[in-house]
């Protein structure tokens, strides 16, 4: 069932809000999840909270939705990721042919990535890139009608960036969204200069909100929050190799804000359910999570820089499959209960 942005009747669709994590090229998994949810047609997206790649997906979806409903959003997302793959970075950050033979997409064995990793640990982006050249910024500016996004009232948009000086998150709303805001949310400090907005400087929002959940609860009417999880919360084994240790440190860092925020909501939910918190400012919330099972966690951090179109399409298919499996198992829970055990996952 197509979503018509001009139609007030939502045809019995269940309203949800989506929390989209960041994760570089792994955001193509989220692209697939979004396409799966949109094409299914049984849910209405009321709000999107995104960080980094999640922020880019969210803004592109809203822009496409404004122009053409469901079909417009699906098309806009595909065109955006196609442009990402065509920036020229794919020739540098692409898995070696022998790495692809066994289905591997990590870049650890490529000389270009090894050199890139070493250089970015020795020199800052201010030294390496004095002209502040950023192909991603060009793609973002060419892909999104920001004036339309700022005036959109059919889907609420919340984009998180991290204030470098104050260590505080800033959440940008529809009316504030610009290309600069998206670049701030996706600003990896070792790769890009801090983005200046209103006299303040920002880095990747994942450090302080990956993504931010509170605006989806406080500023949207939907009672169901669906987290699209890219960075694995749980690992079965303790990493012992240097590369695996660094990978897990990254995952812990970019999950810490989500874990902290969700622990707070778990406490509030428990008090409401026990009848110990009777305050109109707090409402019951149903939490859900869509994740990629064992496929995405098997990839290393280097694959987040892999923009090879075959890899992005692979992640996209994983996302569609994850959305379809989640809907089949949990659609009936929407509007009535959580399908995610928040206490088990975050407490």
Image (tube, helix red, strand yellow):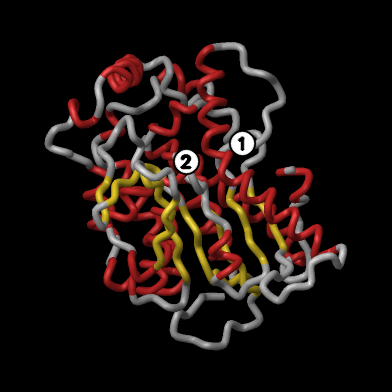
Which class describes the residues within 10 Å of circle 1: few (<14), some (14-19), or many (20+)?
A: some
Q: Nearer the viewer, mark 1 or mark 2?
A: 2
Q: Is residue 32 left or right of residue 76?
A: right
Residue at the far top: name it.
241
Identified at 43% across, 41% down, the residue is 312
Q: Which of the image's four quarters has the C terminus?
A: top right
Q: Is residue 230 above or below residue 288?
A: above
On the image, which quarter does residue 109 sit in? top left
Residue at the far right: name it.
274
What residue is disc 1 on? 232
Does residue 321 appear in this view?
Answer: yes
Q: Position of residue 92 (x, y in %)?
A: 28, 26
Residue at the far front: name it.
166
Identified at 40% across, 46% down, the residue is 162
Res 12 label: none
On the image, which quarter does residue 117 sit in? top left
Residue at the far bottom: name it.
8
Q: CA distance from mark 1 to mark 2?
A: 16 Å
Identified at 28% across, 50% down, the residue is 200
Q: Secondary structure at mark 2?
A: helix
């Amino acid at each position: 069932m197509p979503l018509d942005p001009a139609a007030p009747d939502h045809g019995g669709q269940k309203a949800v809000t989506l929390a989209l994590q960041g994760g570089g090229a792994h955001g193509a998994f989220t692209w697939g999840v979004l396409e799966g949810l949109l094409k299914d047609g049984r849910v209405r997206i009321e709000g999107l909270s995104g960080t980094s790649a999640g922020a880019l997906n969210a803004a592109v979806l809203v822009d496409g939705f404004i122009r053409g409903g469901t079909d417009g959003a699906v098309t806009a997302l595909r065109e955006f990721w196609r442009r990402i793959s065509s920036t020229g970075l794919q020739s540098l950050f692409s898995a070696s042919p022998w790495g692809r033979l066994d289905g591997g997409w990590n870049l650890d064995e490529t000389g270009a990535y090894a050199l890139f990793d070493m250089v970015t640990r020795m020199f800052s982006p201010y030294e390496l890139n004095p002209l502040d050249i950023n192909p991603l910024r060009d793609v973002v500016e060419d892909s999104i009608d920001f004036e339309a996004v700022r005036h959109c009232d059919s889907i609420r948009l919340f984009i998180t960036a991290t204030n470098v000086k104050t260590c505080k998150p800033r959440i940008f709303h529809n009316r504030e969204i610009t290309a600069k805001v998206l670049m701030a949310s996706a600003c990896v400090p070792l790769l890009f200069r801090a983005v200046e907005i209103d006299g303040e400087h920002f880095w990747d929002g994942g450090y302080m909100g990956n993504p931010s959940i509170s605006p989806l609860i406080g500023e949207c009417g939907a009672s169901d929050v669906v987290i699209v999880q890219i960075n694995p919360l749980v690992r079965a084994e303790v990493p012992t190799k240097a590369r695996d240790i660094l990978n897990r440190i990254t995952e812990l860092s970019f999950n810490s804000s989500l874990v902290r925020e969700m622990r707070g909501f778990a406490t509030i939910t428990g008090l409401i359910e026990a009848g110990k918190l009777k305050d109109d400012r707090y409402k019951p919330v149903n939490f859900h999570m869509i994740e990629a099972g064992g496929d995405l966690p098997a990839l290393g951090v280097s694959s987040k820089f892999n923009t090879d179109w075959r890899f992005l399409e692979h992640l996209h298919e994983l996302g569609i499959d994850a959305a379809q499996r989640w809907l089949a198992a949990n659609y009936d829970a929407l509007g009535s209960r959580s399908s995610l055990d928040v206490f088990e996952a975050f407490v």
